[in-house]
C-alpha cells in the first residue's frame, strides 16, 4: 500500500523577497507526528521556509500543500485550526494582560454561533500551566522580561490546540535551563499527544537531541 502524503508539504518552492531569491525548486515533506528541526547559518532562509509553510509568505513558484490542498486556497480559520505559529519577533498589543493574550489563541475556535466556553477556559489554563506563566496571569505583557514574554507567547500557541506547531527560534531570550525545559515540553507534546512540531533552532546540540527529522 502506498503511504499517505504528509499533511504539510512543499512542492518545487522558490522563495524570496522583492528581487532576492532565498531558495529555488525546493521540495519538502514534513513527517506527520514527528519533531522536525530546521538548522543552518544566519540568512540561509530558515525563517523564510517556515513562513511559507504557514502561509505568511507566498512562494514565488511552487505550492505549499496542507491536507492535499494549496494552503493559499484554504479558509483562514481552517488553517488557524490546524497550524499554530510562534513567530521570531512577535509584537505585543499595548496594554494587554497575560491571560488575555493567551486567550487570543482560542480565536480560531470562536464564531457567531460559538462564543467563549468552558473548553476555552480550560485550554487557556492548561497552556499557562505547562509554560509556567499561571502566576503572571494578571500582569501586563509589556512589563515582563524577555524570557517571561516568550513563554506567554508559547502559551498562546498551545492554547490554540492545533495538531501542527511551528516555532521560529522558540528558545530566544531564554537561559539554558529554560531552553531545555521548553524543548522537553515540545517533545512531550510530540510524543504523548502526537503533535507535529517544526522548529527553527540555532543550537546544533539541541537539534541533534530533539529532532526526529532534520532539515539542514
Image (cartoon, grey):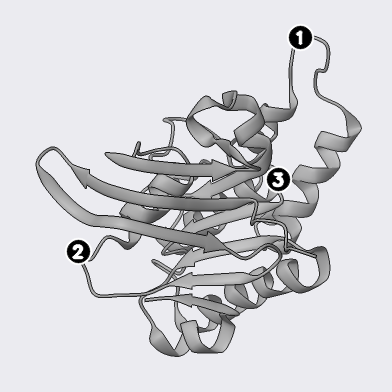
Which mark identifies residue 43?
2
The image quadrant that residue 171 belongs to is: bottom left
The residue nearer to you, when weighing 91 against 78, is 78
Query: Are the residues flagged by discs 2 and 3 in contact, CB closer than 8 Å?
Result: no
Residue 121 percent coordinates (x, y)? 82, 37
CA neighbours of label 2 inside 10 A, class few (<14), some (14 to 19), many (20+): few
For label 3, the SS is helix
**Where does the N terminus fall, quadrant-wise?**
bottom right
Residue 40 percent coordinates (x, y)? 30, 75
Mark 2 or mark 1: name the one nearer the start of the chain.
Answer: 2
Left or right: residue 62 versus residue 14 is right
Residue at the top extreme, as displayed: 112
Q: Which residue is mark 1?
A: 112
Q: CA distance from mark 2 to mark 3?
A: 31 Å
**Where does the C terminus fall, quadrant-wise?**
bottom left
CA neighbours of label 1 inside 10 A, class few (<14), some (14 to 19), many (20+): few
Mark 3 or mark 1: name the one nearer the start of the chain.
Answer: 1
Q: Which residue is mark 3?
A: 159
Q: Nearer the viewer, mark 2 or mark 3?
A: 2
Indicate whether 7 appears above or below 91.
below
Residue at the left extreme, as displayed: 19
Indicate whether 77 appears above or below 213.
above
Q: Residue at x 50, y 88 (%)?
A: 208
Q: Residue at x 39, y 66 (%)?
A: 172
For label 2, the SS is loop
Q: Nearer the viewer, mark 3 or mark 1?
A: 1
Q: Residue at x 60, y 80 (%)?
A: 212
Residue 154 percent coordinates (x, y)? 57, 54
Left or right: residue 40 versus residue 54 is left
Amino acid at each position: 500500500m502506498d503511504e499517505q502524503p504528509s499533511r504539510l508539504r512543499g512542492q518545487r518552492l522558490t522563495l524570496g523577497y522583492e528581487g532576492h531569491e532565498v531558495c529555488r525548486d525546493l521540495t519538502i515533506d514534513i513527517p506527520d507526528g514527528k519533531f522536525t528541526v530546521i538548522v543552518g547559518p544566519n540568512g540561509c532562509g530558515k525563517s523564510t521556509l517556515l513562513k511559507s509553510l504557514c502561509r505568511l509568505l507566498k512562494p514565488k513558484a511552487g505550492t505549499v500543500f496542507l491536507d492535499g490542498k494549496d494552503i493559499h486556497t484554504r479558509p483562514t480559520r481552517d488553517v488557524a485550526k490546524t497550524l499554530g505559529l510562534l513567530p521570531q519577533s512577535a509584537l505585543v498589543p499595548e496594554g494587554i494582560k497575560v491571560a488575555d493574550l493567551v486567550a487570543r489563541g482560542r480565536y480560531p475556535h470562536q464564531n457567531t454561533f460559538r462564543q467563549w466556553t468552558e473548553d476555552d477556559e480550560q485550554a487557556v489554563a492548561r497552556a499557562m500551566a505547562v509554560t509556567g506563566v499561571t502566576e503572571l496571569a494578571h500582569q501586563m505583557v509589556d512589563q515582563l522580561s524577555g524570557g517571561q514574554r516568550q513563554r506567554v507567547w508559547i502559551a498562546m500557541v498551545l492554547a490554540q490546540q492545533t495538531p501542527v506547531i511551528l516555532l521560529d527560534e522558540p528558545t530566544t531570550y531564554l537561559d539554558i535551563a529554560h531552553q531545555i525545559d521548553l524543548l522537553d515540553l515540545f517533545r512531550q507534546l510530540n510524543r504523548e499527544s502526537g503533535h507535529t512540531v517544526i522548529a527553527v533552532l540555532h543550537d546544533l546540540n539541541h537539534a541533534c537531541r530533539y529532532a526526529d527529522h532534520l532539515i539542514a
